[in-house]
Every structure is written in C-alpha cells, then in structure tokens.
Amino acid sequence: MQKRFFLSAVALALLAAHAGTALAQEKFKIGLILPMTGPFASTGKQIEAAARLYIAQNGDTVGGKKVELIVKDDTSAPDVTKRIAQELVVNEKVNVLAGFGLTPLAMATAPLATQSKTPMVVMAAATSSITQASPYVVRTSFTLPQASVAMADWAPNNGIKKVVTLVSDYGPGIDAEKFFKDRMLFNGAQVLDTLRVPMRNPDFAPFLQKVRDLKPDAVFVFVPSGAGAALMKQFAERGMDKAGIKLIGTGDITDDDILNSMGDVANGVVTSHHYSASHNSPLNKKFVAAFEKANAGLRPNFMAVGGYDGMRVIYEAAKVTKGGNGEALLNAMKGQLFESPRGPMFIDAQTRDVVHNIYIRKVEKVGGQLYNQEFSTITDVKDPGKAK
Ligand code: VNL
C-alpha cells in the first residue's frame, strides 16, 4: 500500500516536472496577418487553412521551440495591417510576420519589417516591387510579370494578334498590363486599348462594352483572387464569347476554389499561372487530398500554395537557426530550393523573390468538375520585373 503510494507520488512529481518544462519551453511565434473578412476573405481562409495543414503535417515544434501561430484579420485595410503588425512585433515579439493578402497591405507593413528587422514572408501579394520595399521581405506567392509575359508569348502563336487589356487599377493590375503589353508588342501583336477597372466593387459592364466595340481577338484580364466569378458572369451576360472575343488572363481569373461555380463560360479559358490544383505530381495530389479532407472538400487555390510554401520556408529557416529571428532567420530563408505542390521552387538569395515554373493551362471538365489543365511549361521563371 505504502509502496504503491510512493510510486504514484513519484509519477506525479515527474509529471509536474515535465509540465513545468513544457510551460517554460520557448516559443517560435508566427504572426499571420490576413484578410479574414470582407471581399478578399477567401484569400485569408485559403492561407490560414494551408498554414494549419502544414503544422498538422510537420509538427508544432521547430528548432527546439514550440510553434505559436497567431492569426489576425486585417479586413484588407492597409492601416489595420500595419497596426496589427506593430502590435505583433512589439507586444508578442513574433519571430516572423507572414500573410499579406494584397499589395497595399504588404507595402504598408514593409517599413516596419525594416525598422524592427523582422522577416516578412509575403504569401499572396504579387506586385513585382514588393520585394524591393524592404530587405526583410521574402516572397512565396508569385509575381504578375512572371504570369503575364508567359501569356504574351503564348497568345500570338495561337491566333491572338489583336488584344485589349482589362485590369484592376492597382499594383498587380498595372504590372500585368505593362508586362503583357510590352511583350505582345515585342512579339509583333497589337494592343488596341488598355482598360483599368476600380479594384473594389468593380462594375465590369461598361468596360466589357468598350472591349466589344473594339473587336479584338481576345481580352486579357487580371482581377485579384475572388473577383473572377463576377467577371466571368458579366463576360457571359454581355455575349462576349458569342461575339467571338476570347477571354485570356493570368490564373487569378480562374481561381481553383470558385472555378466550378463559374459554369460553362469558364470552360475553355486559357490562362497562365504557377499553380493548378490539378498539377500532375505525387506531392500535389497528396497536398490537395489532405487540404480537401481538412477543409470540408474546399479545393486549394494558388493562395493556399503560397501559404503552404511560406510555412515551409519559415520552418526550414527556424530549424537551421534553432528558432532564431532577425537577420539570421532571414538569411536562412534565402536560397531555399525545394519541391512545392506547384512544382520546383526556389527563393532567389539576391532578390528574395520566388523562381518557379509558369504553366499555360486550359479550363476543362475532368470527372464532371472544372479544372485548369496544364498543357505547356515555361521552366524556372524569374520575376521579369527585376531585370529592369
Ligand atoms: C494581389 C495579386 C492580390 C494577385 C490577389 O488576390 C491576386 C495583390 C487577392 O498583389 O494585391 O490574385
């Protein structure tokens, strides 16, 4: 009786000691700032789900520290992103800032990353110049010039000689317009007009009417993730396809998570991008299956992949630096080369920007579902925006 009591007392003491060390264990904090509400909530939802999946698959300790993921909603307002980032750096002492659903949100935060020497992993925003806004920015999403130049090389070889461009009137749209147009002209094609629609609550109707009047072979479109469905709907309602005008663009308009809901008008649309949920690799098949399983069947889009790969870059850097921060953590992010669900991926040590394949894809029905089917690959594409 006494002996048994003694043994359980020892067990209790051991348990308490163990709990003590667990409590004292240092944390590795990731501040993930995303639009979780408002018109760009789908981007936040995709990236948060991907980050949680990465942690579930790779464990919640890294470099000997316990990972704490702090998710904050910036409602896609730049001043809010900046204020949250400041709180996370000053009060929470996060090792790394991550997320950034839109270019203005990343731009508002970049000076703070520089001042506080906090690595800032951009998982969504895609204007070329973001990586130049702070030496602490590392990007795991993509850049609009990468996707747009690829489309401008494909289109003129496939019967599209006269185009109009139609883009969201802010950073990534202006990048898409410029790099697509310059490359089309270089390739001997004609750009009849360059139209810009407001970024928020756009009414595409008057712009599509203008496109119709100009009678191009195709309209090249960039709108941010989530806005593609509204564009497709109005494209169909205006009878653009019946008028013989093709719709082409970057993959932002045939977003994987809402592609099925776009219906027939999306079928056959050709786009250029770095990720499709139907990318044919064993790693991607595993990623898509696990993501769908963990999220009630939601299909991951390119935002999810930017988040998933961003977590990979953070975890590997945390391993190398034993849960470090500042410049050491930043340096360990540079030069990472790995297989992503998108294909091979590299963080260029000089530019801190992503180098990856761009695929030309066509929307097709596969097993009753619409997918972006990749049919041509441009390998190891650096951001053309950096060459200037
Ligand atoms: C941006 C670029 C945002 C591409 C997107 O969706 C996108 C950006 C929210 O840089 O603001 O698809």
Image (cartoon, helix red, strand yellow):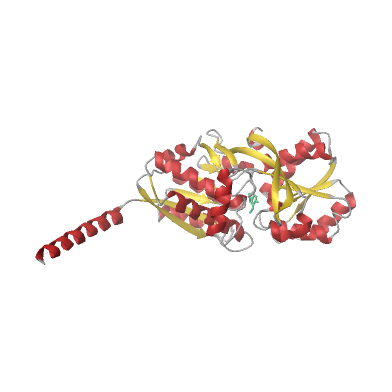
On screen, residue 121 above or below 7: above
Which residue is rendered at x = 65% and y = 48% of the image? 278
Q: In the image shown, does 365 or 262 lie closer to the viewer?
A: 365
Image coordinates of residue 96 in percent, x first then y, are: 45, 48
The count of marks equals: 0
Q: In the image shown, does 93 or 138 lie closer to the viewer?
A: 138
- Residue 117 appears anywhere in the view: no
Which residue is rendered at x = 56% and y = 61% of the image? 36
The quadrant in which residue 379 appears is top right
341 displayed left or right of 30:
right
The quadrant in which residue 235 appears is bottom right
Which residue is rendered at x = 20% and y = 61% of the image? 12
Image coordinates of residue 328 in percent, x first then y, are: 42, 38
Considering the image in quadrants, where does the N terminus appear? bottom left
Which residue is rendered at x = 62% and y = 49% of the image? 302
Considering the image in quadrants, where does the C terminus appear? top right
Image coordinates of residue 321 in percent, x first then y, are: 39, 40
On screen, residue 288 above or below 281: below
367 displayed left or right of 97:
right
Image coordinates of residue 374 in percent, x first then y, are: 69, 43
Residue at the far left: name it. 2
- Residue 233 appears anywhere in the view: yes
